[in-house]
Image (cartoon, helix red, strand yellow):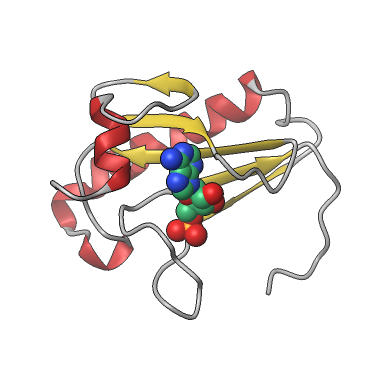
Amino acid sequence: MDNCIFCKIIKGEIPSAKVYEDDLCYAFKDINPQAPVHVLVVPKKHAANVLELSDEDKMLLGHIQLVIGRLAEELGVSKTGFRVMTNCGKDACQSVAHLHYHLLGGVQMTEKMV
Ligand code: AMP
């Protein structure tokens, strides 16, 4: 998508601190980290959020889950724990309209999620 910042990052038109890439997804450090480990995992295919997904994306989503698990191991948070979240829409404060999963870890989080 032409004016999507994450599409531009995936294409290399905007710099990013890449931590992983394959045919289907791209992962990079969040520019404004909220935890010692804060990585964004995004599908290369543009979708604004989970509401724009369909049955044909099942394989892609499963793949992303597996990548997140592997990245958690590589980034050293698989044993201590980590949180995976995706914001969708206004009440969740989604600020970038390209589906992305936050991988957060390296700190003791609270039980509260909102
Ligand atoms: P969300 O609020 O769930 O839409 O998350 C968007 C995330 O993208 C925020 O945590 C931002 O800090 C992050 N972000 C925005 N622009 C960039 C960028 N150019 N490089 C890395 N992360 C970014």
At a point 49% along the width and 80% down the height, the residue shown is 91
Residue 40 is left or right of residue 35, and the answer is left
The foreground one among 109 and 57 is 109
At a point 70% along the width and 43% down the height, the residue shown is 82
At a point 26% along the width and 59% down the height, the residue shown is 48
Q: Report the number of discs.
A: 0
| Viewport quadrant of the C terminus | bottom right
Q: Position of residue 10 (x, y in %)?
A: 29, 31
Task: Find residue 65 and report its image quarter.
Answer: top left
| 85 in relation to 39, above or below | below
| 106 in relation to 23, above or below | below
Q: Is residue 63 visible?
A: yes
| 73 in relation to 7, above or below | above
Q: Position of residue 99 (x, y in %)?
A: 34, 53
Q: Position of residue 101 (x, y in %)?
A: 47, 48
| 105 in relation to 54, above or below | above
Q: Position of residue 56 (x, y in %)?
A: 14, 50
Task: Find residue 26 and report its image quarter.
Answer: top left
Q: Is residue 86 visible?
A: no
Residue 30 is left or right of residue 79, and the answer is left
